Amino acid sequence: MEAGKRIVVTGATGNVGTSVVAALANDPEVGSVVGVARRRPDWDPPRTTWVTADVEKDGDRAFTAHFEGADAVVHLAWAFQPTHDPVATWRTNVLGSLKVFRAVAAAGVPALVHASSVGAYSPGPPDHPVDESWPTHGWPEAAYCREKAYLERVLDAYELQNPQIRVVRLRTSFLFKEASASAQRRIFAGCFLPGPLVDPRFIPVVPDIDGLLFQATHTDDAADAYRIAVLRDDVRGAFNVAADPPIGPGELAGLLDARVVRVPRGAVRTAVAAGWGLRLVPSSPHLLDAFLRLPLLDCGRAHAELDWRPRRTGLEALRELLDGLRSGSGLPTPPLAGRRVA
């Protein structure tokens, strides 16, 4: 057995999982990484082995066996679709997470690092960022936010019941990288938006909508926060993870060389609702409602206690995503497959 820590990562083949696995596999303190995914990828990072498991369908004992001997479990497995069937996503995201949490305790794993999100937060003030003390009640109509917020409550009780387990929750902003572009297009925009159309020549205007202000982080930078949280035995609790600057209509217009046009929020919501109702787009109007109410994140705690700093700005992360959409970038994992695999 190789010296160093043994880390298990669920959801290891997605946008965040591939970056976390790569970050851990290249850290000298890590002896081995076990990537857990529903389908085995054609990707072999160093010191990494793969096991196939499904958080919805496999039982507690299967995950307990996978977690035996681990120094930490990073729980990333998540399903964004189908948005028309919230019971299905609840089974995977909430009941599946409960299964993982129980297995961590049963296997005696000393640390659990959980992928929370800015989506777990209640609507925030428009004029200043919020720290980790802001309420995590989500936006109740959006399944994604409802599920993330519910798991925050679960972990509140879990920490009391399992004080021997160091629990870390990373509440991240939107996470982008070039290799995830094709997958994120499928998840949020659907198959009717060809990636090459995401080109400044075809996007002359950016809508100015009330509430359109968000943060983005390069996925590799967020993965570094996960790596630190895994390896630092003295950190626990919630950490906001986001890069500056906040991105609004002006920043988007500059990135796309477009002009800003004022558009009523209701008109945009009506259009999204129509597309979702006709099953032309996978993103629901409820998710749009949540997006336009998200708070900005104050990352002072991550800077101070994790000594974490993003290497790229939010605009650089978003620019990578746009480049990936145009080129059809991807990775040789089932969730990230693109028109070309880089």
Image (tube, rainbow, N blue to C red):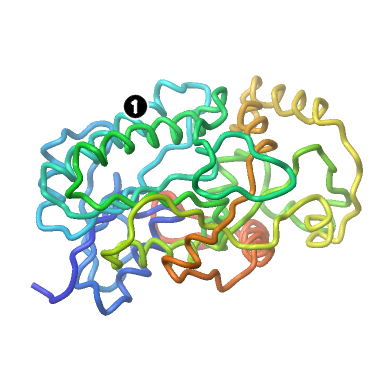
Badge 1: residue crowd in 10 Å (few <14, some 14–19, many ≥20) = some
Q: Amino acid at mark 1?
A: Arg
Given residues 149 and 12, the one toward you in this image is 149
Q: Position of residue 281 (x, y in %)?
A: 64, 32
Residue 151 falls in image quadrant: top left
Whether 193 is drawn above or below 319: the answer is: above
Residue 228 falls in image quadrant: bottom left
Given residues 165 and 335, the one toward you in this image is 165
Q: Position of residue 311 (x, y in %)?
A: 56, 73
Q: Which residue is mark 1?
A: 91
How many numbered discs?
1
Given residues 11 and 281, the one toward you in this image is 11
Q: Position of residue 41 (x, y in %)?
A: 32, 56
Q: Residue at x 26, y 64 (%)?
A: 233
Q: Residue at x 79, y 31 (%)?
A: 268
Disc 1 on helix, strand or loop?
helix
Whether 3 is drawn above or below 294: the answer is: below
